[in-house]
């Protein structure tokens, strides 16, 4: 499977050339930029979900993965904050009512349907956060073709989340006490972290695992170094998804347990 971006001003000859080149690249196994070649059955462009609780390292790993493969890093929280500032229908609804299930998928679609995401692929963190979110994402034109869960226990996640501060001038995350401009982010208080982790481990995780199915990959992100975890994630991304050789499509929506 390969996606071809068509510009509104493209004539029929240009469209035909793009389609021909896309088919030829798919046949010989060419991936997107910096992605090398894939085995038979593997999608031609990486569209990766990194799912994990706060403190699992999903943002750090997502940025590293995007840099390695030349794909687009998509942080749902950043998309949401940007959408709230826009003077459009979505921004107005967000300011009035907050992020509904429908608004969240609209915000995601608006970003991952842009040309850079279609051409290069993407890795997304922070979304989906429920089974319904996952189903909505599966039903769009370019759904994820890699789902990776980062497994970290509650206590480790809380310790990591509590150990992060921000530079009030630049907004960058830094270690607490690392400088005179370092403050604890108001959204990083202990009560909020406990609420977020409670929701993820008691509700969201089971729903997301069930929705992702047997092709999802589970990676321990607790004991190993950041670099070692990244190697595991890269290996999961380039591996060919499990295929049903009888009907010729990826296995999905079932779990072995």
Image (tube, rainbow, N blue to C red):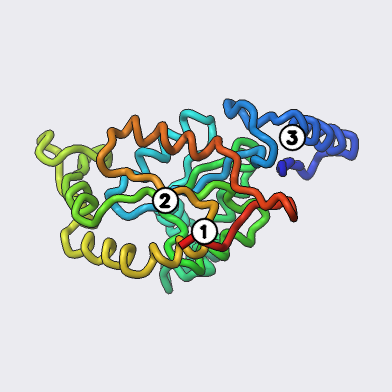
Q: Which mark is residue 50?
A: none
Q: Nearer the viewer, residue 93 or 28?
A: 28
Precedes in sequence: disc 2 or disc 3:
3
Residue of label 3: 26
Q: Are marks 2 and 3 in contact (CB under 8 Å)?
A: no
> Horizontal and vertical percent for residue 236?
49, 39
Q: Relative to 76, is 227 above or below?
A: above
Q: Residue at x 53, y 30 (%)?
A: 70
Residue of label 1: 212
Give the CA separation, mark 2 to mark 3.
28 Å
Give the CA separation, mark 1 to mark 2.
10 Å
Q: Residue furthest right?
A: 13
Residue of label 2: 149
Question: With 210 as the anchor, is 202 left or right in this view?
Answer: left
Question: With 101 as the anchor, is 140 left or right in this view?
Answer: right
Q: Toward which corner of the image does residue 231 lie, by quadrant?
A: top left
Q: Nearer the viewer, residue 98 or 229?
A: 229
Q: Residue at x 45, y 62 (%)?
A: 257
Q: Residue at x 37, y 43 (%)?
A: 59
Question: With 111 as the anchor, is 96 left or right in this view?
Answer: left
């Amino acid at each position: 499977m390969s996606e071809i971006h068509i510009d509104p001003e493209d004539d029929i000859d240009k469209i035909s050339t793009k389609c021909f080149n896309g088919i030829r690249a798919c046949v010989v196994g060419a991936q997107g930029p910096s992605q090398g070649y894939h085995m038979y059955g593997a999608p031609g462009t990486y569209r990766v979900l990194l799912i994990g609780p706060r403190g699992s390292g999903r943002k750090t790993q997502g940025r590293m993965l995007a840099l390695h493969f030349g794909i687009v890093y998509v942080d749902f929280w950043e998309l949401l904050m940007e959408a709230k500032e826009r003077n459009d229908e979505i921004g107005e609804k967000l300011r009035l009512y907050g992020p509904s299930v429908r608004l969240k998928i609209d915000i995601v679609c608006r970003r991952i349907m842009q040309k850079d995401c279609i051409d290069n692929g993407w890795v997304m963190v922070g979304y989906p956060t429920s089974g319904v979110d996952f189903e909505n994402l599966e039903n769009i034109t370019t759904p994820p073709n890699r789902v990776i869960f980062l497994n970290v226990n509650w206590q480790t996640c809380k310790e990591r989340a509590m150990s992060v501060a921000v530079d009030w001038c630049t907004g960058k995350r830094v270690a607490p006490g690392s400088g005179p401009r370092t403050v604890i982010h108001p959204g990083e208080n202990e009560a909020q972290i406990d609420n977020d982790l409670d929701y993820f481990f008691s509700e969201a995780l089971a729903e997301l695992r069930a929705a992702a199915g047997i092709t999802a990959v589970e990676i321990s992100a607790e004991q190993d170094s950041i670099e070692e975890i990244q190697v595991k994630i890269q290996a999961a991304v380039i591996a060919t998804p499990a295929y049903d050789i009888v009907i010729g499509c990826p296995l999905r929506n079932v779990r072995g347990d």
